Each structure stands twice: as C-alpha cells, then as structure tokens.
C-alpha cells in the first residue's frame, strides 16, 4: 500500500512493547505499519519514514524529544486494565496488603488507579518497583512484570500488560488523518477484543443468576433508595408478584410495613429476623452491598417460616430413622425435690457450654434423660445425638463400633468400610453410658479423641478430624477405680470438666407420687394410688430407682382391674421388701443405725449380706450350708452354725428373711439399703 502510514511504539519494557505493538497491529491491520522501539538512553531514535510516535507514558515524552533529530508528533497513550485477567484479583480478601509491581513508581500508581476505576478498590495496594524498600507481603499483582516481583512473595497474580484505551486509539486515528469511513471499522475491531475480555464475566453472571433462581430462598437486590434491580422468581412468588413486574419498583410499593422498610433501608445487618409481610411470616436476612467504602445497596434473603419448619421436620425424621435424635428435654425430668431441681439448674448451665460432661448416678436414675436434655438445649441441638452403652457391646466389637473400620480391616468387614459412632456424631453429641466398664485399650483411644479431636478407623492410616461433644455417664465411683488403677487418671480428669450427680429416688421421695401419676398418664390410665400405697412407696428404698417405679406402674396398669390401687394389688416380692418395716425396727430407709450390729463381727455380717445380695440378683435363695461354702471360697471361715447365728441376728433387725433349709434365706430391701450405705461410708 503506497500511502501506508508508519508509527513507532516506544516503551521502556520489552514485554510491554511487544504486547502493545500486537494490539495496534490487530486494530489498524494493513492501514498502518507499527514499528516497536525499546527506549535506550545510549541510542538515537531512528525517525525515517515515521508519521507518528506513540509512547506508554507522558513521562517519556521529553526523553523521546531529546533523542530524535526532527520534529514528529508524539502521543502518550492512555492505558486500561485487560478485564479478562482480573477474576483472580477480585477474590483477594478485603483490606489485604498487596504489592502492585511495575517497572517504575509512576507506572505502578497508574495501574492502581486503573484497577480502582474498574471497581477493584477493596484491596490495600502498595506500589512496588525495582529498588524500592518495602516490607514483604504475601501477594503481588503485576501487569506482565512477574520478573520484577521480589523474593518472598508467596502468590503472584499476572493480570497481563495494560492495553491501549479506545480514546487513545481514536486519537491515533485522527492524528494519522485516516479516512473517517474507517473509524467505525477500527472501533469494531477494538470492541471485539473487549467483548471477548468481558465474555467470562458475562458467563459468570449467567451462572450466578441461575444459582439464585434454583435456590429455595427468595433473593432481591436494591439500591440505597430502595429501587429493586434484581429479584429472583422465588422472592416474587413469596410476595405474590410477577418477577418482571417487580424490577425497577421501589421496595415501599412491595412491603407496606414501615418498620420493616426502615430496617431494610438502614445501615444495620439483619440476621434471621422473623417478620410479618402481607399476613405471612417470613425469616428475613439482609447484608449491605459496598463498592469499596461506598454503600451501593442491599441484598435481601427471604424464607417462608412454614418452609423452614418443614425442612427441620424432614431433617429430624431422617435423623430419627437413624436413631440419632434426642427425644427428652428438661420437662421430662419430673419432680419438685430440692436435689432434683438443683441438678436440673446445673444441667441448664452445662447445656450452654460445649465442654465435656460426666454424669454420675445409680442405675435407673435418669442419666440419659439429663444427657439428651443437655444436647437439646445446646448449640448442637440440630445435630446428631448418638448414644452408646459400653456395657452392652462386647469388647471385641466396641473399637470398630466407636471408631469405624476400613475395608479389609478384619474378616467380615463391610466393603468400603464403615464410619464409626464418633464420625456419625460429627458436629453433634455422643453419649457414652457405663464408661466405667471400658478396657484400658479403649480408654487410651478415648483420651486421644478428647485431646486431639481426631480419630483413626480400625485398619486405617488416615487421621479424621471430628467435632463432637462428649457426655459420659457411670454408675461407678470412677475416682475409686482410678485409685485401683482400673481407670486412667488423665481420662478421668478429661471427662470430669463439667459434672452432675443425679440423685437416687430414695433421695427425692417427695417426687414418688408425682412420678407415679406421670407414668399412669403416659399409659393413658386412670388408675390412682390409695394413701396406704403412697405411704408404702415412701417407705420403700427403691434400689432400682425410677426404672423400678416405672416397671411397677406398668405391672399395676396391666394386672390391676380396679381404679384405686391398694396394698393387696402390689406384687408379692415387692411386699416382701416392705414387710420388714412393720416389725418396729427404729430406722427407716435413709437413716440406718450402724450400731444395730456388733462392730467386732461387722465383717462377717457384711459378707453374709453380700452373698445373699449377689444371689438374689440371680433369683437364688441359699441355705446356711451353701452360704458357708461360698464364704470359705473367699477366705472367710464361718461354719454353717456360725452362719445360722449371723442370719438370726440379721433377721431380728429386718435385714434378711430366714426360712426353712429348703426354701433358703434372702436379703430384704432394708438389708440392701444397709449394704449401699455401708459401702458409701466405707
């Protein structure tokens, strides 16, 4: 082409020079010849045939003038950020200190200015150039100058060379006096590259909008004046509008409640606030939309309360199918006794914490009800509650049940392995009952769980982090087991951070009548206890605690036909335990007089009572000969005659019932209570 124009692209950086030369060639194509020239202080810039000089900064104009031999027009171009490369920059945390690296201070500042112009103003940019002194930061952003980034920076984001702005392209066009008819073509060529640069952002916005449409939440965005500029279909549907008709309307036209409008248009965030809109209850969330430090508007999230309730119901049903739901709450702990109320009040405080809990108490006192109530009132209430009874699982299976196992860990292991109870309780609570029955090996692994918050499956090598609150329970004296070296001391103190002592039924006798009525009510029964039976219940020691009372009520409801329950309706073995108190002995349950028996022979009496107590559990009644044999096996030498005398003394004070040799002797409830008190005091 004879009249082809010629321009020089001048810069101080090779990569910048090449990139901008390519851009100009792409825009002007055959109309203009572009010659790249790298500015060097030692060289004279050749000017032969040049119609125009283009440089990357106004700071270079004077230097160029000093290096040319004839006057040629010089245009310092305006440059802008290549938008297709800024996605990674947008993801940097707000306020983070970041190097903006370029070859000179002024070019670094220019780039920062350009980034802010396109909305990247949430980052604390620090200009960095070769030779400057600055404290090293973790991230550096650079327009093609990765080789200029100082050592020690952990993450480098190259946004590519800043391209020439459309305004400078038009200025070059006019300076070269190109035909006006070509300006539209040049503009389209430039725009084509910009469209490609923005295509990623357009696709991202499409994905984002699609995401907002499939969510179950109503979502809307509005400016600071309350004008809606985005509404998803769910938001419109919840408020009874068509989606397209809501756009550009003001929120005051949609919601009439002034209090809610004031809250939406305030500078306060809204977090899960229940509101009434058009006679329907919703949960409202609001966040503020900032561009840098300037408030641009608000984003609203709306959920229908009925929908939330249905979701919660669905979650509860799924957990219930697995059995991982707490069924009981504090109102299931029936009673008015001082000791019970005291422990309930402690438990309510314990629920607010996330620390480990140890619950101590006899069998049948309601330890698991306390554990479930604590979980239900804790921050983990919507997560699983997993209960495991150590006494109910064999030692060989316990480890794999608790911690899970990998495929092939042992013969019969399920394909793919299996998650243990700790994994299934993740984010929730695990209740370990009868923890005093665990082996040393399991104790060590439990200690690790409490210390490190992690487990390893049986047969596995991968450490699995878990977030579980542990509530343990026992009917044993763990401190005594520690002294006997049967329970780890470090585990004991890891468990006993917060603790409860659940009272026995004997310690809360004023609750017995209330509990009986509660159990009858749960059974849908109209049966009632006579005053005589209530008095009998008060005298009884209830070694099986609440569970024994509950079982007795079940028995009565199924067997007794009359509405009022009398003494004659009570089962025979229960009456046997009560009859002793009608003999005139001076000490009711709870007030045992240890002077009833000669102290020098107390060891013998206790031994006889323990033999009878153990055999009663097995449903056996022993004669004096058999008792003598058993005592000799544990190195207590009492002849059958001596056993007979001891039994006679014990019968006098109501501790045993002595019958014929064939029928054997049996311990009474008063005798069992005496044993319990003796063990507690010794």
Image (tube, rainbow, N blue to C red):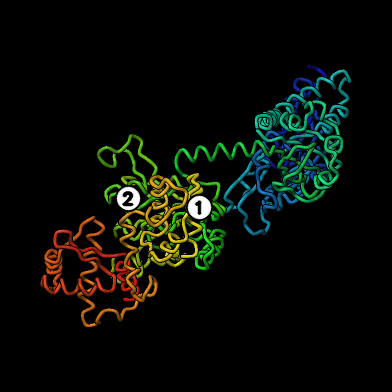
Mark 2 vs mark 1, CA separation in Å: 29 Å
Q: Is residue 613 above or below residue 399?
A: below
Q: Left or right of 478: which side holds 127?
A: right
Q: Nearer the viewer, mark 2 or mark 1?
A: 1
* Crowd class of label 1 (few under 14; some 14 to 19; many from 20; radius 10 Å): some
- Say which of 233 and 338 sits in front: 338
Numbered mark located on residue 518 in the image? 1
Q: Quadrant of residue 228?
A: top right
- Say which of 464 and 537 sits in front: 537
**x 13%, y 63%: residue:** 626
Q: Left or right of 149: which side holds 202?
A: right
* Crowd class of label 2 (few under 14; some 14 to 19; many from 20; radius 10 Å): few
Numbered mark located on residue 175 in the image? none
Q: Earlier in the sequence, mark 2 or mark 1?
A: 2
Residue 599 position within the rendered picture, expressed as x and y whole percent measured from the top left: 25, 82
Q: Secondary structure at mark 1?
A: helix
- The quadrant in which the C terminus is found is bottom left
- Say which of 664 and 357 sits in front: 664
Is residue 424 at least partly visible in the picture? yes
Numbered mark located on residue 392 in the image? 2
Residue 583 position within the rendered picture, expressed as x and y whole percent measured from the top left: 32, 71
Q: Is residue 525 above or below residue 354?
A: above
Q: Secondary structure at mark 2?
A: helix
Q: Left or right of 643: which side holds 21?
A: right
Residue 554 position within the rendered picture, expressed as x and y whole percent measured from the top left: 41, 48
**x 72%, y 33%: residue:** 20
- The quadrant in which the N terminus is found is top right
């Amino acid at each position: 082409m004879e009249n082809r124009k010629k321009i020089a692209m001048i810069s101080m950086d090779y990569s910048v020079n090449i990139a901008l030369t390519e851009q100009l060639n792409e825009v002007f194509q055959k109309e203009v010849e572009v010659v790249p020239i790298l500015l060097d202080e030692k060289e004279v810039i050749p000017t032969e045939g040049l119609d125009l000089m283009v440089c990357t900064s106004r700071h270079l104009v004077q230097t160029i003038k000093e290096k040319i031999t004839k006057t040629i027009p010089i245009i310092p171009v305006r440059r802008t950020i290549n938008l297709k490369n800024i996605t990674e920059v947008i993801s940097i945390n707000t306020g983070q200190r970041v190097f903006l690296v370029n070859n000179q201070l002024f070019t670094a500042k220019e780039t920062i200015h350009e980034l802010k112009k396109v909305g990247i103003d949430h980052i604390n940019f620090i200009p960095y150039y070769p030779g400057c002194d600055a404290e090293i930061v973790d991230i550096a952003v650079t327009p093609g100058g990765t080789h200029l980034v100082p050592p020690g920076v952990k993450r480098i984001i190259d946004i590519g060379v800043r391209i020439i702005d459309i305004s400078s392209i038009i200025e070059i066009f006019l300076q070269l006096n190109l035909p006006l008819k070509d300006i539209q073509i040049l503009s389209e060529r430039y725009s084509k590259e910009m469209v490609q640069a923005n295509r990623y952002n357009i696709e991202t916005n499409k994905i984002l909008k699609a995401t907002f449409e499939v969510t179950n939440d109503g979502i809307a965005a509005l400016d600071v004046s309350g004008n809606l500029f985005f509404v998803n279909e769910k938001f419109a549907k919840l408020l009874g509008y068509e989606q397209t008709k809501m756009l550009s309307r003001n929120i005051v036209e949609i919601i009439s409640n002034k209090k809610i409008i004031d809250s939406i248009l305030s500078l306060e965030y809204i977090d899960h606030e229940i509101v009434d809109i058009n006679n329907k209850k919703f949960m409202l969330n609001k966040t503020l939309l900032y561009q840098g430090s300037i408030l641009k508007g608000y984003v609203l999230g709306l959920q229908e309360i009925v929908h939330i309730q249905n979701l919660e119901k669905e979650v509860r049903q799924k957990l219930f199918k697995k059995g991982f739901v707490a069924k009981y709450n504090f109102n299931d702990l029936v009673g008015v006794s001082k000791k019970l109320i005291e422990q309930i009040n402690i438990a309510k405080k314990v629920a607010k914490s996330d620390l480990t809990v140890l619950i101590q108490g006899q069998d049948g006192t309601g330890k698991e009800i306390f554990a479930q109530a604590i979980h239900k009132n804790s921050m983990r209430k919507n997560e699983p509650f997993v209960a495991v009874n150590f006494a109910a699982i064999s030692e060989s299976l316990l480890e794999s049940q608790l911690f899970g196992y990998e495929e092939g860990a042992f013969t019969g292991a399920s394909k793919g392995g299996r998650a243990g109870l700790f994994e299934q309780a993740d984010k929730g609570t695990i209740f370990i009952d009868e923890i005093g029955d665990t082996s040393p090996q399991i104790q060590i692994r439990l200690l690790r769980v409490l210390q490190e918050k992690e487990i390893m499956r049986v047969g596995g090598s991968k450490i699995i982090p878990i977030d579980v609150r542990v509530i343990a329970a026992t009917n044993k004296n763990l401190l005594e087991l520690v002294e006997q070296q049967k329970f780890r001391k470090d585990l004991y103190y890891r468990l006993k951070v917060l603790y409860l002592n659940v009272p026995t039924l004997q310690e809360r006798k004023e609750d017995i009548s209330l509990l009986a009525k509660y159990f009858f009510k749960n059974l849908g029964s109209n049966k009632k206890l006579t005053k005589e039976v209530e008095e009998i219940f008060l005298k009884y020691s209830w070694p099986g605690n609440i569970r024994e009372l509950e079982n007795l009520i079940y028995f009565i409801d199924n067997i007794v036909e009359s509405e009022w329950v009398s003494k004659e309706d009570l089962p025979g073995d229960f009456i046997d335990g009560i009859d002793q108190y009608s003999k005139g002995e001076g000490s009711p349950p709870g007030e045992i007089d240890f002077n009833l028996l000669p102290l020098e022979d107390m060891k013998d009496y206790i031994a006889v009572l323990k033999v009878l107590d153990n055999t009663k559990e097995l449903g056996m009644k022993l004669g004096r000969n058999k008792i003598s044999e058993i005592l000799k096996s544990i190195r207590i030498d009492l002849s059958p005659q001596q056993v007979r005398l001891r039994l006679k003394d014990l019968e006098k004070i109501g501790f045993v019932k002595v019958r014929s040799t064939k029928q054997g002797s049996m311990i009474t409830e008063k005798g069992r209570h005496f044993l319990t008190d003796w063990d507690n005091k010794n």
